[in-house]
Every structure is written in structure tokens, then in C-alpha cells.
Image: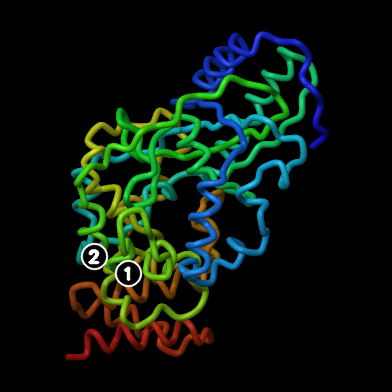
């Protein structure tokens, strides 16, 4: 983007206007922060040094761009951080799906339209509203699409605090929300950073199926089910397969059991409504889809991120953990000679679970 110096403007009025425009566009909260991420940079370096990022090599390849916004986008002065709720199911119905004997569990954020598209479009419109108000200014929109430390930025902008599970939590609405940013060359009033309210609670640590939260505020992504089912492209390590249960895309356990999420509100954004009954998908049905069906059912969805082969790998693993039945064994047998070595390996593992 081409950055421009701000003209003389009433920055407090502009900040209030941005918040109002943001709410009109469906964002629950808008905050502002500077670009100082020195503390987060130290934490990131330590995390990378411990190799907790596993095969997520993109976390290290951009050098300091992730923690120094003005290196990523020169002349960045202020960052607008935005939060949008996405939960469309109540807590009780969500809990009932965990380790269900027949149903798949898909992380709640991936049930509807791809959030990248939804937030990016609305943040772009927010940028256009600002531009119409003050004439040209430099900005770039980001939604989990570049080396950006979105959670530390959101915490500094007062949108919530980073909890022990490393997700952002808001005292009034919990943690079921997406984040997006506008990097700008504007001088804006800085919001007050959020305080932490996890206290002595360690529910998220206790319920994590793979014990990926190895200490408060420290996540070993290599153990995390979201990493294992999405980021990891090869074989799922044997020691984690049984622990994955029926989770075929991501994992929400640390959020589902977080006490602060009793305050979570239903999203009003219809784009996030579940598609193709993905909120209670039958495991056998999911496994028997051909690639054409899978592409149709996941069109415009974040599920496309993993591809059909990984989908079959994940569902085969979940079928191995499901309650034994003739139907499950029959379904698995349809792919025991798959052309994919990855799929074949996990199908045979699943069949072994039902052999006794």
C-alpha cells in the first residue's frame, strides 16, 4: 500500500466514527493500538526456539515482519483491530457432539462461509468509509492472511486478553470470535490494553485431549488437534490418534469448557450459519463422499484448506475411534486399497481398532 501522512483531523472523533461504522458492518468491537510488539516478539522467539510450531514453517520464515508491523507495511503508525462473533450453536448442543459414536466434530468456526472472505470484505468497506471521511490514507486489510500477531495486537487494542489456552477472551462475550486488522498510517488514540481474568482457573488445560497446553499461556502446537488435523500434512502420530476422537477438523474443547464462554452470544452474521448439515455430520457419510461431492459440500468454506486426501485421513481416524459396527467396517473397507498411501495407512489403522 502507499502510505500518506494524515492531514490535520480530529482523531478522537474519527476513532468514534470508526467504531460506529465497524458496528454497522457487524463487528462487535473495534480498538486501536500502536505498533510496539516487543513483548510479543520475545514470546514468539522463545516459542519458535522450542520448535512448538512443528511444520508451520511460515511462522518463522518472515523474520521480524510478524512482530514489527512497520517492516511488513512501511510507515504503519496505528492498527485498527476488529472482533466479530461467529458462534451459531449453543454450548449444550456443541458439547453433546464431542466424542459422539457416529457424528463428526468440526470446529465451529468452519461450519459456514470462510471467515477470511467475510471479514476481509467488511474490513475493506470500513477502510473505504474512513477514506471517504478523510480523503486518501494508507491502509492494508489483514485477516489471518499475512505475518501478523493478531492476538497480541487485539489485546493491546483492548479487545480481550490472551487466556491460558492462548486464545483471546473478552470478559463480556467469551472467545468465540474472529479477528481482523487494518494497518494504517493514521495517528489514532490508543485504546487501553485488556487485563487478564483467567485467575486460578485451569479448565482449558485440564480438558485438552492431547495435553497440548503444556503450561499456562504455552501451547505446543505439535500436540494440538487443530494442528494435527489441519496444519500437519503427513501421518498423524500414533500416540495422538485415539485422543483425537471424532474431531475431523480442528478442536474447540478449550473454548467449550472455558467458564467465560457462558457469556457468549449467538452471531447475527448469516454467513456463519452451518452449511450442508456440517454441524452434525455423520462420519460414515463424510467418509463415503467422493471428491466431487466433497468439493461441492465445502465450496466457499475454510474446510478447503486441508484438501480431500487430508479429509479422508481425518475421517478414517475418527471412524477408528467410533463405536464398532458392521457399517463402519464396511465403509472403511471401501478405501483400504486407496491410491493414497496416507489414506490407506489411516484406514488400516482404523480397521485394526475394530478387529478385536
At horizontal 77% and vertical 40% (from top left) the residue drawn is 74
Q: Quadrant of residue 336?
A: bottom left
Question: In this figure, which residue is indicated by the disc labeled 1?
Answer: 284
Q: Are marks 2 and 1 in contact (CB under 8 Å)?
A: yes
The answer to whether one can see residue 122 in this image is: no
Q: For the residues marked 2 and 1, what is the alpha-carbon distance in whole angstroms?
A: 8 Å
Compared with residue 107, is residue 21 higher up or lower down, i.e. above or below? above
Q: Position of residue 104 (x, y in %)?
A: 31, 61
Task: Locate residue 142, reporting x and y percent.
Answer: 63, 41
- In the rendered image, residue 240, in percent from the top left (x then y), is placed at 32, 76
Q: Is residue 135 left or right of residue 211?
A: right
Question: Residue 127 appears in which quarter of the rendering?
Answer: top right
The secondary element bearing badge 1 is classed as helix
- Disc 2 or 1, which lies upstream in sequence? 2
Please indicate, yes or no, whether residue 185 appears anywhere in the rendered image: yes
Badge 2 element? loop
Residue 102 is labelled as: 2
Q: Looking at the rendering, in which quadrant would you find the C terminus?
A: bottom left
Left or right of residue 36, residue 313 in this image: left
Q: Residue at x 50, y 25 (%)?
A: 30
Front in this rendered view, residue 344 or 160: 160
> In the rendering, at what x and y percent does residue 99 appear?
22, 63
Image quadrant occupied by the N terminus: top right
Q: Is residue 225 left or right of residue 72?
A: left
Amino acid at each position: 500500500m502507499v502510505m500518506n501522512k494524515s492531514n490535520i483531523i480530529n482523531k478522537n472523533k474519527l476513532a468514534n466514527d470508526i467504531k460506529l461504522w465497524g458496528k454497522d458492518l457487524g463487528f462487535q468491537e473495534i480498538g486501536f493500538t500502536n505498533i510496539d510488539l516487543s513483548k510479543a516478539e520475545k514470546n514468539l522467539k522463545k516459542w519458535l526456539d522450542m520448535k512448538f510450531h512443528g511444520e508451520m514453517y511460515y511462522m518463522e520464515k518472515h523474520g521480524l515482519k510478524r512482530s514489527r508491523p512497520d517492516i511488513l507495511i512501511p510507515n504503519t503508525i496505528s492498527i485498527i483491530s476488529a472482533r466479530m462473533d461467529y458462534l451459531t450453536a449453543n454450548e449444550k448442543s456443541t458439547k453433546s457432539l464431542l466424542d459422539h459414536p457416529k457424528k463428526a466434530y468440526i470446529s465451529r468456526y468452519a461450519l459456514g462461509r470462510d471467515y477470511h472472505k467475510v471479514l476481509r470484505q467488511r474490513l475493506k468497506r470500513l477502510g473505504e468509509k474512513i477514506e471517504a471521511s478523510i480523503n486518501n490514507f494508507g491502509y492494508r486489510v489483514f485477516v489471518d492472511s499475512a505475518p501478523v500477531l493478531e492476538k497480541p495486537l487485539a489485546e493491546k487494542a483492548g479487545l480481550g486478553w490472551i487466556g491460558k489456552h492462548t486464545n483471546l477472551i473478552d470478559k463480556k462475550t467469551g472467545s468465540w470470535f474472529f479477528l481482523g486488522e487494518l494497518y494504517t498510517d493514521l495517528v489514532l488514540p490508543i485504546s487501553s490494553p485488556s487485563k487478564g481474568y483467567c485467575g486460578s482457573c485451569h479448565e482449558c488445560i485440564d480438558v485438552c485431549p492431547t495435553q497440548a497446553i503444556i503450561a499456562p499461556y504455552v501451547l505446543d502446537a505439535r500436540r494440538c488437534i487443530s494442528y494435527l488435523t489441519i496444519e500437519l500434512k503427513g501421518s498423524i502420530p500414533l500416540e495422538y490418534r485415539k485422543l483425537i476422537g471424532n474431531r475431523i477438523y480442528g478442536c474447540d474443547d478449550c473454548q467449550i469448557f472455558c467458564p467465560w464462554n457462558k457469556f457468549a452470544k449467538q452471531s447475527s452474521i448469516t454467513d456463519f450459519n452451518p452449511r450442508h448439515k456440517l454441524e452434525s455430520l455423520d462420519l460414515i457419510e463424510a467418509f463415503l463422499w467422493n471428491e466431487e461431492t466433497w468439493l461441492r459440500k465445502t465450496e466457499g468454506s475454510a474446510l478447503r484448506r486441508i484438501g480431500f486426501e487430508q479429509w479422508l485421513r481425518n475421517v478414517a481416524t475418527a471412524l477408528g475411534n467410533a463405536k464398532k459396527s458392521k457399517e463402519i467396517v464396511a465403509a472403511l473397507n471401501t478405501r483400504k486399497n486407496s491410491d493414497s498411501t496416507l489414506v490407506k495407512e489411516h484406514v488400516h489403522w482404523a480397521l485394526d481398532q475394530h478387529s478385536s
